[in-house]
Image (tube, rainbow, N blue to C red):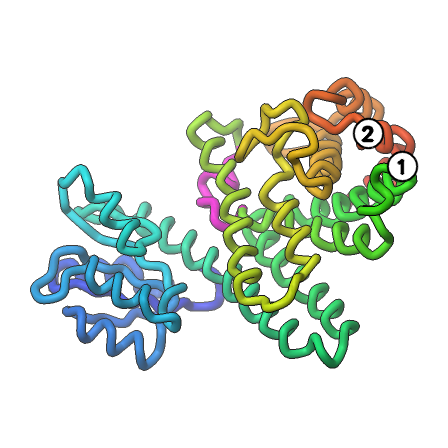
Amino acid sequence: MDEYKATILVVDDSPVDIDLLTGILKGDCKIKIADNGLKALEISRIAPPDLILLGTEMDGMDGYEICRVLKHNERFSDIPVIFLTDEQDVNFETKCFEAGGVDYVNKPINRALLLARVKTHINFKKIKDVLHSSTQYFENKLASSIENISTMQDVFSLAMVSLVKNRDNETGGHIMRTQLYVQELAFELANYKKFNHILTEENVKMIAKSAQLHDIGKIGIPDHILLKPTVLTQQEFDVIKTHTVLGRDAILTAEKIAKYPNPFLKFAKEIVYSHHECWDGSGYPEGLKANAIPLSARLMSVADVYDALISRRVYKNMVPHDVAVNIIKNDSGKHFDPDIVDAFLRVERKFYQISELYASE
């Protein structure tokens, strides 16, 4: 946990389990306790917690019913609920997620597993809260000042980027460089007739600003995978892939709140969700092909891969600029949009200059 201490509501009618959970969480967060459903709902009404640990089997209202009641109240619907259960029913997972839970932990409780899942869902809630607050601010200020909205988009982006950087220190320079790569690439591609109606100066600036958010979903990835110092297993890589969906879902939350079209959120959602798609359909999360991949995400893909190639990581060495350029050139029509690769080859020296200028950021 970080310096901010989240408030966690523990709901269970077993004193033994409550003592166990309190002992595990003590020091990392603020803890509130309820031994029945009515008390849990009353505590939530007075001061909504950041997360709820909810036993499934209790006298009176069981955990599923409590969760359904919470999720039907708009004030509580965004509170993540992690079920605690010793159920052996094969349909348990379905019951958990249909009731509105975000995760579950089996009893007997594994301390490390519980802390990891609590941390993951609290961090992800922070993303949603920042998005919610920023979007409401945009709503309130739209009529009076477009300039203020642009400023708040910058503040919002920096806040989101800061959350990601706090999880993974390697992403700081990467975020700065890829934003500048995308801007150079988009302005060059705007010289092509078939793209100039999309890549207006305003849209290019908005796409570049949105590019900072491309990895915000990583805040929902467990530390032992995100910060692993060696090559990931296939199972771990499958978890990493979910950062595209986690980031997309966070931005969707903001879009639902907004009452007007917001190009910043539109481009951010495209980039966050689709920057790992490949031109030939071999990417993820949907296996989109060619022009089905949003243009903003296709731009981000080239920028992201270039920077990954030239950067040193604990599990790999960097490659020289010229080698990275050839790798991208050879992947034209496979990983990358051929037109964007063509534009990249025209500005690749600018990419190199950016990489040198911000190498230590």
With respect to residue 358, does 332 lie above or below?
above
Q: Quadrant of the N terminus?
A: bottom left
With respect to residue 177, does 290 lie above or below?
above
Q: Residue at x 26, y 67 (%)?
A: 69
Check if residue 226 falls in the magenta segment. yes
Q: Amino acid at mark 2?
A: Asp
Check if residue 185 falls in the magenta segment. no
Residue 361 seen in the figure: no
Q: Dot 2, crowdedness within 10 Å: few (<14), some or many (≥20)?
A: few
Q: Residue at x 46, y 26 (%)?
A: 233
With respect to residue 93, does 264 lie above or below?
below
- In which image quadrant can residue 263 be found? bottom right
SS at mark 1 in the image: loop
Q: Which mark is residue 192?
A: 1
- Using residue 117 as the reference point, say whether residue 105 is left or right of it: left
Give 164 or 112, whichever is nearer the viewer: 164
Q: Position of residue 235 (x, y in %)?
A: 42, 29
Give 313 or 332, whichever is nearer the viewer: 332
| The residue stretch that appears in magenta | 218-229
User: Do residues under tags 1 and 2 come within 8 Å of each other at their CB atoms?
Assistant: yes
Q: Residue at x 40, y 67 (%)?
A: 6
User: Sequence order check: which comes first, mark 1 or mark 2?
Assistant: 1
Q: Residue at x 38, y 70 (%)?
A: 74
Q: Amino acid at mark 1?
A: Tyr
Q: Dot 1, crowdedness within 10 Å: few (<14), some or many (≥20)?
A: few
With respect to residue 73, does 62 lie above or below?
above
- Using residue 136 as the reference point, say whether residue 38 is left or right of it: left
